[in-house]
Amino acid sequence: MSIDLLNIARTGVQASQAQLGVTSNNIANANTEGYNRQVATQSSLESQRLGNNFYGTGTYVSDVKRVYNEFAARELRIGQTSMSAAETSYSKLSELDQIYSQIGKMVPENLNNFFASINSVADLPTDLGIRTNSLSSAQQLAAGLNQMQSQLDGQVKQTNSQIESITTRINEISKELGNINLELMKSQDQDSQVLDKQDALILELSQYAQVNVIPLDTGAKSIMLGGSVMLVSGEVSMSMGISTGDPYPNEPRINASIGDKTLNIDPSKLGGQLGALFSFRDDTLLPASTELGQLALGIADTFNEMQSKGFDLNGDVGSDIFRDINDPLMASGRVGSNSTNSGTAAMSVNIDDVGALSGSTYQLSFTTANGYQLTDNQTGKVSNLTLSGTQLTSSAGFSINVAGGPIADGDKFEIRPTAGAAAGLKVVMTDPKGIAAAGPTLTSASTNLGNTSVSLNSMDSTVAGFQVGSTITFKLDTTTPTTYQAFNAAGTEIGTGPYSYSGNNINAFGMDFDITGSGTSNSFTFDLAFAEGNNSNAVEMAKLSDVKLMNNGTGTLTSVFENTKLDIGSQTKSAEVRVGSATAIYQQASTRVQSESGVNLDEEAANLLRFQQSYQAAARIMTTAQTIFDTLLSSVR
């Protein structure tokens, strides 16, 4: 036996050639997205015994592996999910902020213009040109709110479309990962190129939602979304889908399906772009829409109520300027019924007090044990409601009518009192003479005692006892029991009193007014005489621009919109800060991955020279072995 120099040289050449091949492949893929650097592990062949000594027999490449750190890759995926969520939130909020800054600025401008036009009517109450201009301002105000609502609806549709597109892409990735798992199970997790493709797809998937990767003994990887949805299990791929919103169809939900089983997914647990889109739609867009509806209801109710307190240019009690707040076209979408309800009850919502509305949404539930419960989705406050006839009355400014059949145990309804109002707002007055600039005169009797006062809410000329051009006097006894009598201009009692009333409100003979203070036998006279130059009601209308009518007396009409705008601006700024923070974290994770798995061209160039020299040296061994062999042959000739 002897040392086989030619064989040793051959193994050296082959090993160096393999090392050169791996190094060259790294250099060639230096700019390939998702490529992980590969290294060849070189080992010695088994030694050979000659006499009392052991001699080496050469070398070989025992393995070619990709440089991969699972912990660094996981950190990168987490950073990718957070950054994608932050970028998506900022992008969507920036779009909405621009809508409110550019298109939305016309809403408060139109409202101020309308108040200014009412003030002009107060200056010249008989000028038909000014009255016509005032109606035009009202129409611009309504059109502005209609357009703003249309923009918000467009944002909802666009967001839903993005959710659907991402869901489609997730399903494509799911199928590809299932096929890759099948390949890896065949190759026992040895194909670096397939592994790189798998990691690239998982990293892309982490943009759309939070990803958990579970390595399997077979070489495959199971993928979970949001920590609860199994997307890929071995070679089996699940699918995600979009289902009709419940209880509102235009707010689709997301689900996962395997076989014939479908599970609804909580989008708040998904993270990534999907979680950000759902959060934007449900937590920003929908509240903005309900608050816009709250403003529309406030405008319609405020001016229609003021109209009912005055006389138009024809001498009649003023009619509505805007569509009634409880008109079906203003009430569209106030109630949504859950698809799981087993009862046949149909709900409708009636606005009772616009000033008490908060712009919030509610859940109405019924159980045999607890009865009717109304939960404020914003504050979490739960109120127990009592059914009186077919009506449930809340303290939040609205009542709920129950009709169409019985309600079943466990039935739930979504209540959005202000939904649809901004889209349904419309000027219904066509005659400029209809603006009720004039108002009745209220006189307190000189003999009144105490501090009792009254304030007019509305007038109704269709009620018996009401006469335009005449007077009506109410004599109040505010002691217990509280009673009143009514007298016409001649001092003749209207009807047969005294009449009892409860609380602080009297609604009789076409007059609706509130009583404050205390005193006994106090008299108040309403002079219903109409005069063309009377502008008292128009003056009161113009003053409402600065009166805190909304949100239980804490905000003006304009502030409702401005607060929404400021809130969106604040959310946008916060989202911008989150983008910067999330990007920095992602870049840090990416740098760590690149430092381990990325291709360093300087290092690879050095390796290229080293393995080239190794190849040349191994080839030189072959030459030496050939020379020795030739010399040996020559010596025996």
Image: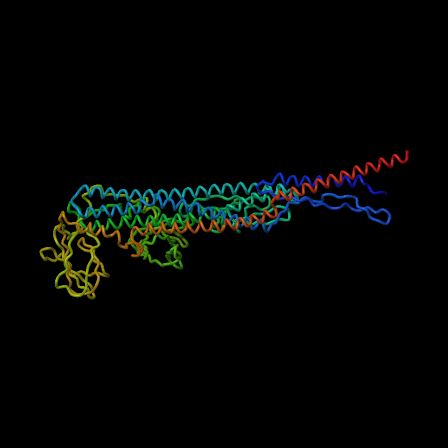
Residue 104, x across and y down, in percent: 34, 45
Horizontally, residue 614 falls left or right of residue 38, namely right
Q: Residue at x 34, y 54 (%)?
A: 358
Horizontally, residue 211 falls left or right of residue 343, namely right
Q: Residue at x 41, y 51 (%)?
A: 571
User: Which one is nearer the viewer's eye here, 304 or 488?
Assistant: 304
Residue 551, x across and y down, in percent: 31, 55
Horizontally, residue 273 falls left or right of residue 366, namely right
User: Which one is nearer the viewer's eye here, 122 or 235?
Assistant: 122
Q: Quadrant of the C terminus?
A: top right
Residue 111, x across and y down, in percent: 28, 47
Residue 94 in view here:
yes
User: Which one is nearer the viewer's eye here, 421 or 100?
Assistant: 100
Q: Residue furthest left?
A: 490
The relative height of residue 478 versus residue 331 in the rendered view (above or below) is below
Q: Check the image and tell me how it is coloured.
A: rainbow
User: Which one is nearer the viewer's eye here, 62 or 343?
Assistant: 62
User: Total number of numbered labels?
Assistant: 0
Residue 341 in view here:
no
Q: Residue furthest top?
A: 637
Q: Quadrant of the N terminus?
A: top right
Residue 389, x across and y down, in percent: 30, 55
Q: Residue furthest right?
A: 637
